[in-house]
Amino acid sequence: MSARAITFPNYTQIPSRIPVRVWHAMRAGSIVGALAIAALLLVAPDAGLFVMWKVVIPLLPLLFLTVPGLWRNLCPLAASNQTPRALKLTKALTAPNWLKEYGYVIAFGLFIAFVVLRKLGLDDSGPYSALLLLGAMAAAFTGGMFLKGKSGWCSTICPLLPVQRIYGQTPLMLVANAHCQPCVGCVKNCYDFNPRAAYLADLHDSDNYWAGYRKYFVGAFPGLVLGFFAVPVEQMALTTAVSLALFATLTTFYKTSAHTITTLFGAIAFSIFYWYAAEIVGLEPLTWALRAAAIALAATWFVRTLRKEKPFLEKAGAAPAAAAAPSAAPAGLTRASGLRAIGPQVTFVPDNKRVAPKPGQSLLEIAEANNLPIEAGCRMGICGADPVAIKDGMSCTSPIGDDEKATLERLGYAENTRMACCVRVTGPVTVQLTPDKASAPRISQIQDFSYDKSIERVVVIGNGIAGVTAADHLRRRHPATNIDLIAEEPHHLYNRMGISRLVYGRSAMQGLYLNPDKWYDERAITTWLNTRALWIDRANREVALGTGEKLPYDRLILATGSRSLVPKIDGFGAPGTGVLRTAADAMALRAYAQRVSSTRGVIAGGGLLGLEAAYALHKLGLKTTVLERGPGLLRRQLDDRGGELLKAYLEGLGLEIVLNAEVQSVDANGRLRALDLKDGRRLPAHILLVAAGIQPNVELARDARLAINRGVLVDDRMRTGDPAILAAGDIAEFGGQTPGLWPTAVAQAEIAAENAVGGDKPYVPAPPVTMLKVVGVELASIGRIHEQPEDEAIVHEAHGGYRKLVISGDRIVGAILLGPGNDVAAVRTAITKGYDVSGQLGALRQGRLDGLAQGALVPAAVA
C-alpha cells in the first residue's frame, strides 16, 4: 500500500528510498559538519558566523515547510541524540511524567531565550555561538544516554521543535523516519510516527492544556519574529503580546476551527521571517523576488494545510469544532436541571484536573484520554478492573446496569463506587480514581435463599474469574459452609485481559489484582496459592493436593480454565517461542526480549488474544507481524467489511498483518532466528507467540472419569455426571460450546455456586460478547453478526467507525460496533434483554442510538 493512497501514513507506510546504512553515514556527516562549523566559529569567527546565522538558520524554516523529514533524519542534534541508541549505550528509560507534560513548554521557552540572545549579541560572537552549538549537541547526546526514542531531546525539549511542528505538518515531500525503527512510543502524537497527523492530533487532544501549549506558541510566533527583526529587544515583549492578543481575539470571536487560525498565524510568521531574511542577498530585485516566492509558498502551504482537517476529523471520528453542537443529555439520567444545564464535566481529585468530555465517552475513556493512571479489562463492568469513587455528582451519572451491579456487589467497596467503563456523565461529576473502602465489609448476602445445611465443605479448583465468582456466590448463599479455593498460580485473581501491560508497562502485578486484599478473609474463603490439585477421589469425596494435604468436600466446583492451544510447529519450544496466557508468560516474555535485544516479533493467530499480544510486542519496541491463517481478522466476531477496517487501522498503528499464512517450522540455534511458513516464505523473528485458540484444562476431570468432550460435559444446572461435582468457565462444555468468554464464565459460576448449596437454577446462555481495545480502536461484537434471509442488517460507516445491527423480529439479535460513537452498553442491554425496537427502527436506520441510550424501549415480553 503506497503512502499516496493513505491520507495519514505512518512511518511503516512511507516508502524508504535510502538504505539505513546510508542514513547512518549522512548522520555521521552532519555531526562532523556541525563540529566543523563550531571550529570555524572559534578560529575564523566572521566566516563561521556567516555560515551559521546567514546560511544555515535562514534555510531551516524553508526546510521545515518543504521536506521536514529530511531535517528530522539529518539534524546534527538529532544525530547526537540517537548516537547512544545506535551504539546500544542508552538506558532507554521512559521519560518522567513532568517531561512528557511540559516538554513542549520547555522547548518554546528555550526557543524564545535563543531568539532574545541573538538580539543581545549572540549573532556577533563566534565563541558564544560555538558554545551554543556544542552545548545543544551535548545536551541532546546526554538525553539519548538516558531516555528512550527521541524523548530525551528531539521530541520534547529541542528549541527548534515548536517551529518544526508548525511547518512540518504538510510536507511537500514525505521522508520516512530512519531513526526510530521500530517506534518505541516514547512521546504522544509523535511526528516521526505519523507526520501528517501529528500536529492536528495535538490541537484536537482531549487534554485542553496539551493543545493549549501549542496554540499559545503559534499565537505568539508572528509577534516574536516581527519583534526580532523590527524593534529593539526591550520592545519584543510588546509585539509578542499584541500577536497573542490578536490570536486570542480570533479564536474567541471568529467561528472557525483552531486549526484554521494556527495555520494562518504560521503562514504569517513564515512570510515575516523571509521578508526580512531576503535582505541578506543585498540585491533589491532579488530581494523582492525572494519575498514574493516566500509569500506564495506560505499561501500554498496555508491552503494545503487547511484541507487536511476534514479528513483528519473523519478518520478520528470527531466533528469539526466549529460545527459541533452540544448533545442532549439522555433523559432519566439526572433530575437536577441546573446541573444538566452545565453540561458534562469531570473533575479528577486530588489533583483537581477538570476536563470536558466528548459526548458518549465513559469515565474510563475520559481518564485514558487524559493520561490518568487507570487499569482496564473487559470494558463492560464485569471484570472489576476499573472501580472509581464518585465523590460528587452521582445524579449526573448513567444508571447502574445488571453487570456493573453484580461486579460492585462482588468488590464490596463503599456505596459511592462505580465501574469507570460503564459510567457516562451528563453534568458536573467529581471522581477519585482510587475507590473508597467500605466502613464495614460489604458482603451482598442473597436473602431468603434456602441453603442446604448439610453442605459443610465446598472446594473450588481454579481461582480465575469463574473460580472466584463461584466462591463469592457460595458465601452469599451459604454463610456457614467452609470454602477452599485452590490456585495453581501464585497470584490472587488478576485481570487476565490486562496482562499485555506486563510486557511493556512499568506497574508489574500491582495494578492487575481485581479484589481488595482483605476480600478473601472478609468472606472466610481459604485460598491455596501456588498449589496444584493432583487428583479427585470421587468415592471418598477428597481432592489430593501437591503439598500432601487432602481436602474433603461435599461439593466440588471445577473452574480450572484453559490454556493456549499450540498446533504442531516443528521446533516450537526453542528459546524465543511461547504463548501469552498468564502473568508468568508475560513477565518471562518481557525478560527474554530485553535479554536478547529482540527487534522482531511474530504472532501466529489473528484472534482477540493474538492482536492484543501483537500490540504488546509493538509497544515493547519490536517490529511485529501478525500471521492469520484465514482470509480476515476476527472471523468469528467481524464480517468482511469490519475485518477490512480493523486490518487497515492496525496497519496504521505500525503492525504488519499477513493473511492466509501459517507457520510450518522455526529456525533456532540456541534461540529463535527465523520462521518458515507453509507457503514457502521465510520471516526473520526473535520472538514467536502462538495465539491459535484455547484448550480446556480437562486432565483432572478425565482422570476422575467424568464425561468429557472438548470440555467437561455439564447440564443446564452446571452439574457433571457426578451430582457432587459441578463445573464453570472455560472448562465447562454446555450445548456443545466452550465459549472461553469472561461474561460466560461469570454467569456459569453463579449458577454452579447456587446449585452446589441447595439451589435448582438453570443456566440460560446469553448472546456472546467480545471486546477489543488496542489504543484508539474500540470493538464490540455481540450476538449473531451474520444476518439470515429474513433479517434486516442496518449498516453505517462514517467518521472512521463501522456499525452493523442485525434485526430479527423487531429485536436486535447481534451487533458489530467498531470505532468511536457507539454506545456499547445500550446496544448490549437491548440485545440481552430482548427489547422490542420496532418503534426505533427509523432512528436506527438513520444511525441514531439515542433511543437505546435513553432507555426508551421496553422488553418485548412486557410490550
Image (cartoon, grey):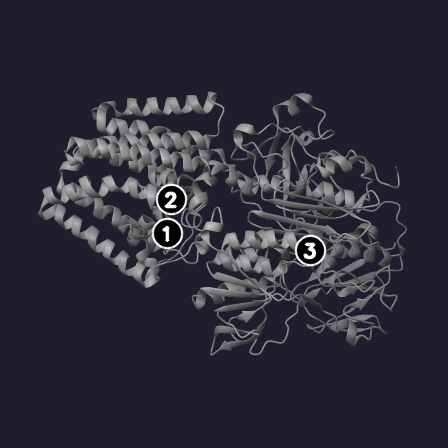
User: Helix or strand or loop: what does disc 2 sit on?
Assistant: loop
Task: Name the element at disc 1.
Answer: loop
Q: Earlier in the sequence, mark 2 or mark 3?
A: 2
The answer to which of marks 3 and 1 sits earlier in the sequence is 1
State the residue at coordinates (72%, 65%).
560
Residue 130 horizontal side relative to residue 2, left or right:
left
**Residue at mark 2 to residue at mark 3: CA–CA distance:** 39 Å
User: Is residue 538 at all visible to an observer of this figure?
Assistant: yes
Q: How many tags in the picture?
A: 3
Whether 370 is drawn above or below 536: the answer is: above
The residue closer to the viewer here, 642 or 368, is 642
Q: Quadrant of residue 750?
A: bottom right
Closer mark to the observer between disc 3 and disc 1: 1
Instruction: Establish if 207 lies above or below 326.
Output: below
Viewed as shown, does residue 386 lie left or right of 49?
right
Residues tagged 3 and 1 counted as in contact (Cβ below 8 A): no
The label nearer to you, 2 versus 3, is: 2
Q: Amino acid at mark 2?
A: Pro
Residue at mark 2: 171
Kindly state the secondary structure of the residue where label 3 is placed: loop
Tell me the quarter of the image containing the C terminus. Answer: top right
Relative horizontal placement of residue 179, taking residue 553 as reference (left or right): left
Query: Label 1 belongs to which residue?
Result: 175
Q: Residues within 10 Å of mark 1 (few under 14, many from 20)?
A: many
Residue that badge 3 annotates: 637
Residue 558, image x and y in percent?
Answer: 77, 65
Residue at 68 percent across and 32 percent down: it is 394
Find the distance from the CA under tag 3 to the CA under tag 1.
37 Å
**What residue type is disc 1 on?**
Val
